[in-house]
Image: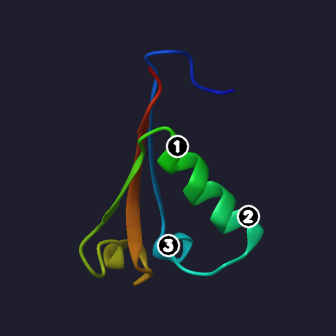
Amino acid sequence: TFLRPGGHLAAIMSAGILQGQSKARQGFRETLQSYGGTFTALPPKAFRTAGTDVATVLVRMHIS
């Protein structure tokens, strides 16, 4: 509901979204896939200079 047709979403998230079986995580993954969205792993420790070594992914989606 936040993206208009032709809109793009890009976000950086914890890689934890790819794991776990909670309804929220499963629902997010299913919704993203239904729109042809992708998860791309970012390099390990990509945000170390910002003070965190959390594994991260780039999430992308395009609304036709």
Question: Which amino acid, by three-letter code, is at mark 1?
Answer: Ser
Q: Find out whether the residues at labels 3 and 1 contact each other: C-beta distance under 8 Å.
A: no
Q: Which residue is mark 1?
A: 34
Q: Which residue lies under the disc numbered 2?
A: 24
Q: Residue 42: x, y in percent?
A: 28, 68
Query: In this rendering, would 26 be left or right of 63?
Result: right
Element at label 3: helix
- Check the image and report above or below for 13 versus 19: above
Q: Residue at x 62, y 81 (%)?
A: 20
How many numbered circles are shown?
Answer: 3
Report x, y in % for residue 15.
46, 74
How many C-alpha atoms fall within 10 Å of the one at disc 1: few (<14), some, or many (≥20)?
few
Q: Which label lies toward us, 3 or 1? A: 1
Residue at 66% in and 78% down: 21
Q: Quadrant of residue 55?
A: bottom left
Q: Where 63 sits versus 48, above or below?
A: above
- The x, y position of residue 28, in whole percent, is 63, 56
Q: Nearer the viewer, residue 43 or 34?
A: 34
Secondary structure type for disc 2: helix
Q: Which residue lies most toward the left here?
A: 43
Q: Residue at x 43, y 39 (%)?
A: 61
The residue carrying mark 3 is 18
* Vertical placement of residue 32 versus 8, above or below: below
Q: Mark 2, mark 1: which one is toward the viewer?
A: 1
